[in-house]
Amino acid sequence: MSTLLARVNRRILIVDDTATIHRDFEKILSPQSIEDDDLDSTERALFGSTAAITLQSFVLDSAFQGLEALNMVENALANDLPYAMAFIDMRMPPGWDGLETIERLWQVDPKLQVALCTAYSDYSWEDIDERLELGDRLLILKKPFDAIEIRQMASALTAKWQMTEDAALKMSLLEQAVEERTLELSDANIIVQNSPTILYRLRGEPSFPLMYISHNITKYGHIAAKLVASANWSKELIHPDDLPKVDLAMARVLDRHAEGASIEFRMRTGDGAWRWVENRYIPVRDAEGRLLEVEGIILDITERRLAEEKIALLARTDGLTGLANRATLIERLHQAFAAARRGAAAFAIFTWTWITSSASTTPSSHAVGDLLLQEVARRIKACVRENDVVARLGGDEFAILQLDVSDPTQSAALAVKVRDALMQPYSLAGNDVRASVSIGISSCTAEILSADSLLTQADMALYRSKEQGRNQYHFHSEEINQEVVERMTIASELKTAIEHEELELHYWPEVDLSTGKILGMEAQVTWNHPTRGILEGPAFLPAAEKTGTIVALGHWVLDQACRQMRQWRDEGMAPPVIAIKLSLAQLKSGPELIYDVLRTTARWELCPWDLRFDVTEATLAQTKWTHNDVLTTAAGAGGASASPSTTSAPAIPPSITSRPTRSIT
C-alpha cells in the first residue's frame, strides 16, 4: 500500500487517584536513553517505509478522577488529538469507579483502548461482562505491576489503535495488486511477534492453500514455513471435531455477498495440547467480485472460555429437569445473535407447550407431574444436537435454541422430530399419559433487530400454532412457513415416489458434432407425480437438497443408470459412459459416496469408469474446502468434471427413458 497512515498516535491517559502511581507510569513509559530499535522496526513493518516513524516513547497525561478523565478525552477529541489508550484504576473514591469511568469514556470515544488496573474487584466477571464488552478493547492488568508488562501492553494497545485507523484507509485501496498486499502482510509479521494475535492469508481457490501465517505461531509450537508448505495445514491446526463447523464458515465466505465470518474452534499446539481461538475471516475480491484471497486473524480466547466454564459450573439450570432455565437461554440467545451479526451461522429459537390427558384412574399428583417434566426433558435432549440449547422456561413451557441453521427446513425437521417424540404415550407411576404439542419457531434473519424480539416472535408463532389446532408447528413468518411446508411435503412425497416407482431416468446423448459419434449419455430424472403430473428436476431437486432426501434419490439414480448400462451392454449397444450429476449433499457424504459407487457398479458387473460424474461450479464452490479426496477418488474411479451451470442437458433429439418396471425396446 502506498499510503497507510495519516499520523502516529502514542498518547496515553493515566487515570488513578494516587499520585505515586502516575510517577511509576512515567518512569516506565517515559523516553529512554537507548533507542528502541525493535519497536522502530515493528512500526516500520506495520506502517510502511514511507511513514514518518519518529516517536520512540509515549506521550502521557494524568487524570485523578473519572470525571476529569472524561473532560480530557472530550478536549482531546475536540482538538483532533485523541488518546490511543488509557490505564484506568478500578477504585478511585469518592468519584466514579473504573467500570463507570470506562463506560463514560467509551460513550465519547469508542476507539479508546483500555487497560483496567486492579488488585481486587467489587465486581464478578459476570457483572463486568454485563456492563462492559469483554472484547479486544479491554485488557485486565493485575497489581502489583510489572514494568515490562506495562510497556508491552502500552505498545500493543497503541499499535492496535493505529492498526484500526490503518484498516479504514486500507478499505479504500483494495484494488491494489495481490502481491503488494501479500508483501505488506508478511512485513507485518514483525509487529505481531510479541502479540497473542495471529494473522494469516489463504489463496481464494479450493482447497484454500495457506499463503502466509505470522511468525508468532511459533508461540504455539509450530513453524510458520512448515505450515505454509503443508498441503494439510488445517488438519495440523484444527481439532477434528471442529472441522465441520470451520467448513461451514468457509462456505459462507465463498458467497460473493458475504462480508466475512467468525467462528471459534480448538487449535492444536506443538505439544499436542489444545487452545480455544476465535477465527475471523475477511474475503478479498476484485472489482468483478471474484474471490482473490481470504485474510484471517486468530485470537487466543482460552482464558475467556475457561472463565465461561467456571460460570457454567455455577450454572443457572432448572433444578427439576437439569435443563437450562430462562436466564441461561436468554444469555445464550444474545451470544448467538451477536455471533450471527459478526458473520457466524444463523440460528432458530423454538418455544412450545402441551396439553396432557391421563387414561388411568390413578389420581394425578405433583410427583407424577415432576416425572412427566423429567421424561419430556429426556426426550427433547434425545432429539437435539450437542451444541443446541434446551431450556425449561417455567411450568410446561420449554424452548430450544437451534444453532448453525443454514435453512428453515432444518428447523422444521427438528420440530417434527420433537413433536413426534413428545406425542408418544407416557407411563408414569401407574399413570398412562398422552400429550398434544404446539410449537412456535422464529428464525434469525437480517430483518431481526434484537435478540429479545426473536423470543417474542417465537411466542407469537406458538399462539398461532395453538389457534390452528394441536400437534402443529408454525414459523413467525407466514412466507417462511409456506415455503418450509412446501419443501417438507415434496420431500415426504419424494420418499414415497422412490418406493412406488414414480421416478424415471431420461438419457440424453452427448454427440461430437464434427463426427456424429456418441460420446456418452447424460442421465436426468423426472417424476410422474400422481397429482401434479410430470415434474422436471428443477421442480423438486432443490427441495430434495435442502431436506437431505437428495442422498436417497442420488442412490436411486446411480442404481438405475448402472442397470440401464448393463442392459445396453448385454444388447451390444452401450455408450462409452453414462454421466450422472452429483449434489452437494452427496459430496459431503464423503467416503459413503465412493462406497456406494463401488458397490453399485459391482452389483451390475460394471467398472466405475463406465460412469462420469458431473459437478457444477456452484456445487464445487460449496464443498468442504479442506477435503477434496472425494472428488479425487471419484475422478480416479470413474471420472469427475465441473460444468458452469446446473442445466447441462443438450437440446437434441429424443431421449431414451428408463423405467425400473420394464425394459427398453
Image (tube, grey):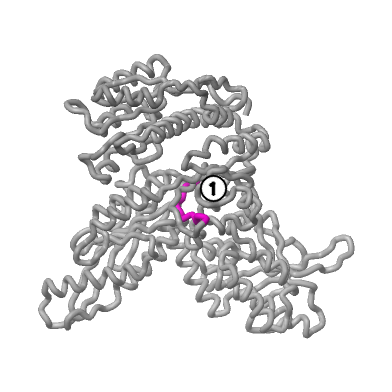
* Residue range highlighted in magenta: 261-270
Q: Residue 360's quadrant in the figure?
A: bottom left
Other residues around mark 1 within 10 Å, as few (<14) / some (14–19) / many (≥20): few
Relative horizontal placement of residue 508, taking residue 218 as reference (left or right): right
Image position, residue 9 (x, y; %): 46, 23
Image position, residue 645 (x, y; %): 67, 55
Image position, residue 161 (x, y; %): 45, 29
Task: State the quadrant of the N terminus.
Answer: top right
Name the magenta segment's main secondary structure. Answer: strand
Q: Which residue is mark 1?
A: 218
- Residue 321 lies within the magenta run: no
Most foreground residue, 288 or 75: 75
Task: State the quadrant of the C terminus.
Answer: bottom right
Most foreground residue, 487 or 612: 612
- Residue 269 lies within the magenta run: yes
**Residue reaching furthest front?**
33
Q: Is residue 287 visible?
A: no
Give the residue displayed 78% in from the left and 85% down from the top.
Answer: 570
Q: Secondary structure at mark 1?
A: helix
Is residue 147 placed above or below 413 in the rendered structure? above
**Residue reaching furthest right?**
515
Image position, residue 359 (x, y; %): 18, 81
Give the residue displayed 16% in from the left and 71% down from the top.
Answer: 369
Relative horizontal placement of residue 426, taking residue 609 as reference (left or right): left
Relative horizontal placement of residue 351, taking residue 487 as reference (left or right): left
Most foreground residue, 571 or 237: 237
Q: Which three-letter amino acid code belongs to the residue tagged 1?
A: Thr
Most foreground residue, 153 or 50: 153
